[in-house]
Structures are given as structure tokens and as C-alpha cells.
Image (spheres, rainbow, N blue to C red):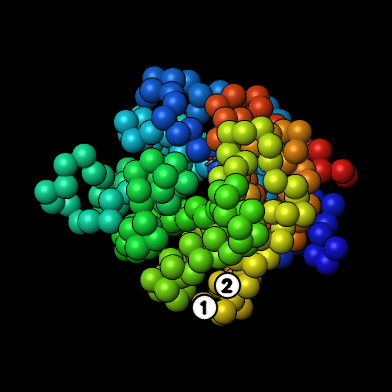
Amino acid sequence: MAGVTRDGGASARGRVPLIAGNWKMNLDHLQAIAFVQKLAWSLKDARHDFGAVEVAVFPPFTDLRSVQTLVSADKLPIAYGAQDVSAHAPGAYTGEIAASFLAKLECGYVIIGHSERRTLHGETDDEVAAKTVAAIGAGIVPLVCVGETAEDLERHGASAVPLAQLEAVLESIPKGAEFVVAYEPVWAIGSGQAATPDQAQQVAAALRGAIAQRLGDDAAGGTRILYGGSVKAENIAGFMRQPDIDGALVGGASLDVEGFSAIVRYQKHVGV
Ligand code: 13P
């Protein structure tokens, strides 16, 4: 396989792999402080090279200020972000959180268009695009989620829906803006049944092709594409060996410090 190294493919092509933990609606701010502290210790003990594999956590909104305070006081090399953002500037939008507020909390990233928001909150491709624009405008890197349901998979194959979802966003992304794509097949989320590395690679390659077509080869070559859906320490290595997969968006397994830390340290069990 072209471009694959002993460490997995991503770093060989200049894309720093990103292992991201989406906590969803888990862990309050006190639990968040304890978790991030333990994660930092665990990775430090293991001499993790944060420059080689970036680590990010996505706690609930109410935890972000606590995480910011801890990360900045202890200078922890852990990135963090929110799980959603408003498309609007500050104003009369009860319950929403503006991108500028997240920027004030020094969030590096924000997850946008997670399938749980698309399904449970009816988020449309247009809203996902508008939120992406808002994040970029505030200097936050959007982590845009795309993925097909089991029904989509049966009807249209794996790539069609994620591609259409990504294309709807690409139209709004200004040239030169950094963004991350997470391919998360809906049927693989929380099911214990991950996609195979080959399946995920095929879709990731198609997504990269769409980025190339819309924003050019440099953007396609520099954009990280993550896989998400039942990722755990036991299966991360297979995904990271794929040339177009540059990391993972981890749900359930990101809530256990040791398990998440083992996923971050996938290079130790990628077959070297
Ligand atoms: P699981 O890792 O629990 O399948 O969740 C994936 C996910 O939705 C991450 O955003």
C-alpha cells in the first residue's frame, strides 16, 4: 500500500494524526478535571509524543471552562473543543453557544454535524455548512462529521451519502481554511460493530477526492480525515494503517482513561 509506514500512513504524508474523544453528554466539570489530569499523566508516563499524534477531547459545554483552566495552568499538550456551535453571532438565540464564546475559551476545535445532532435535532446540511463557516470565522477548526445509515448503505452504498454531506459543506469553506472531516458510519456508532479498515479507507479516499475537486490538491493532501464508530484499542491499528485515515473520533472508548490512552498510543500496537 503506497505511503504506509511502520507508524501508519498519516504522518508519512505530513498530516499529524488526530485522536479525538467525543464525550457526548457524559462527565460533569468535576469529572472532566479528574479525567483530563489522569489522561495527561497516563500519556506522560508512557512518554507519548504529542507532536507525532495529536490528542483532543470534546467535553460538554459546561466543562469547557474547567478544562481550559486546567490545560492552561498545567500547560497540558491536550487540545479540546465543543461538540456543537451556533451558526449565529451573539444575540437572541436561547440555549445556543456562539463560536466567539468558544474562541474565548481557547477551543481549538468544534465538532459539527455529528449524526446524533443530524438525527435527534434535525440538523440539515445547510445548518452544518453555516456552523462550519461560523467556526472558521472565529478561528476554530471545524471537525465536520459525515456518515451513512444502515439504510443508506443498503440503498446507495457506503460513499454516496457521506460524499453528498461533505460536498454540501465544501461549497462554503473558504480556500486555505483548516478543517477536519470525520467519517462516521451511523450503523457503526455505539454498536460495537466498526467498519472494516478497507471499507473506511474506500470512503475516506472518496472524501479526499471531493476535497481535491472543490478546494485543490493541497487542501486534499493537508486535510485530516478521521474514522469514527466503535473504535477501541483493539481495532485502531487497522484503521491507522490506511493511507487516507488520519486518526479517529472515539465515543464510548474515550470515556476510559486507560482505554483512550491506549488508542492514542496506537503506534505501539500498529505492528512495528
Ligand atoms: P462510539 O465510539 O461509541 O461508537 O461513538 C462514535 C462517535 O459517535 C464519536 O463521535
Q: Which residue is mark 2?
A: 210
Q: Nearer the viewer, residue 47 or 231?
A: 231
Q: Position of residue 171 (x, y in %)?
A: 42, 73
Q: Is mark 2 within 8 Å of ligand 1?
A: no
Quadrant in the picture for residue 199: bottom right
Amino acid type of the residue that numbered disc 2 sits on in the rendered structure: Ala
Q: Position of residue 141 (x, y in %)?
A: 44, 56
**Label 1: few (<14), some or many (≥20) within 10 Å?**
some
Tell me: 184 left or right of 79: right
At 61% from the left edge and 58% from the top edge, which residue is drawn? 155
Q: Nearer the viewer, residue 100 or 42?
A: 100
**Label 2: few (<14), some or many (≥20) within 10 Å?**
some
Q: Which residue is mark 1?
A: 214
For the residues labelled 1 and 2, say whether their Cβ atoms are less than 8 Å apart: yes
Q: Position of residue 247 (x, y in %)?
A: 64, 49
At 50% from the left edge and 28% from the top edge, which residue is drawn? 36
Q: Secondary structure at mark 1?
A: helix
**Is residue 246 visible from the viewing direction of this image?**
no
At 44% from the left edge and 56% from the top edge, which residue is drawn? 142
**Is residue 85 visible from the viewing direction of this image?**
yes
Amino acid type of the residue that numbered disc 1 sits on in the rendered structure: Arg
Tell me: 100 left or right of 136: left
CA–CA distance in space, label 1 to label 2: 6 Å
Q: Quadrant of the C terminus?
A: top right
Q: Which mark is residue 32?
A: none
